[in-house]
Image: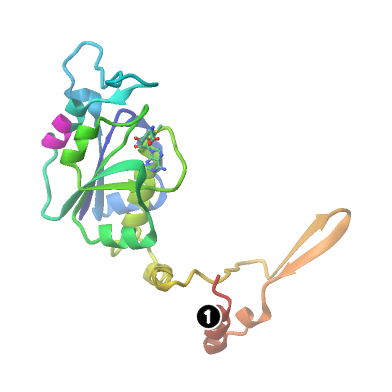
Amino acid sequence: MMKFNILTIFPDIFNSYINESILKRAQKKKLITIKTHNLRDVISNRHKTVDDKPYGGGPGMVMMVEPIYKTLKKIKREKKFRVIMLDPAGEQFSQKTASELAELNQLIMICGRYEGIDARVDEFIDQKISIGPYVLSGGELPSLIITEAVARLLPGVLGHQDATKEETDALEGYIEYPQYTRPETFIYRQKRKTKKLSVPKILLSGNHQIIGEWRRKHRK
Ligand code: SAM
């Protein structure tokens, strides 16, 4: 059982996504748990403030260290855990990182908002991860991306185990081959002409050896 703990000021964002499809089934089968922790829950001030102006001036607000520290302290640690901060300047997330994280028992992820997070939070984290070279408004989507990429590598999460095996080949420099499903010929209209797109004949041959060769040759 792998645990995902997500620290956020917008826990409702997660409800829909984690309660559908693969993540829903994985939780039902008790292969994973996903728990969100509202950073405002540990704040005693009346306005539940989690951000403040930056020292030294500058635009925007900065997330305070205390709510994050207090929330982290409340989370029970499993044997092999990692505390991750979502950060556009962090290490680029990849399939390789997902495989490494899938070896752990628990991922604790901190979602930033505003202009960023008080730098003292660095004392309480193990790794900073970026999901790509662009800036989003918060760490919620990045944390969901990591959750899904890691969860689908765990035994039993995907129905078809070969799917992850073939995707994992991407680690050795291969990317998947082109895939097709029904219909055999797709007919459509464009600029008043009827056009056809057919599945490569080899894939209909039933000969797994030549299909395998074709797929190796056509890896993207
Ligand atoms: N001023 C910050 C900077 O330039 O690094 C941007 C902060 S961003 C508006 C707010 C939060 O969104 C960040 O603290 C981080 O948690 C999250 N975030 C934004 N883009 C991200 C990315 N590409 N990967 C991971 N997290 C990201």
Percent across and percent down for residue 76 are 11, 42
Residue picked out by circle 1:
216
Residue placed furthest toward the front: 56
Kindly report the secondary structure that dominates the magenta region of the rendered protein. Answer: helix
Q: Quadrant of ligand 1?
A: top left
Give the magenta-colored segment's residue range: 69-73
For the point 40% across and 45% down, which residue is it? Answer: 20
In the image, 211 versus 167, the foreground residue is 167
Label 1 environment density (alpha carbons within 10 Å; few <14, some 14–19, many ≥20) = some
**The residue tagged with tag 1: helix, strand or loop?**
helix
Report whether residue 23 is seen.
Answer: no
- Check the image and report above or below for 211 versus 96: below
For the point 32% across and 42% down, which residue is it? Answer: 86
Quarter-wise, where is residue 10 in the image? top left
Q: How many marks?
A: 1
The amino acid type found where label 1 is placed reads Arg
Percent across and percent down for residue 204 are 63, 80
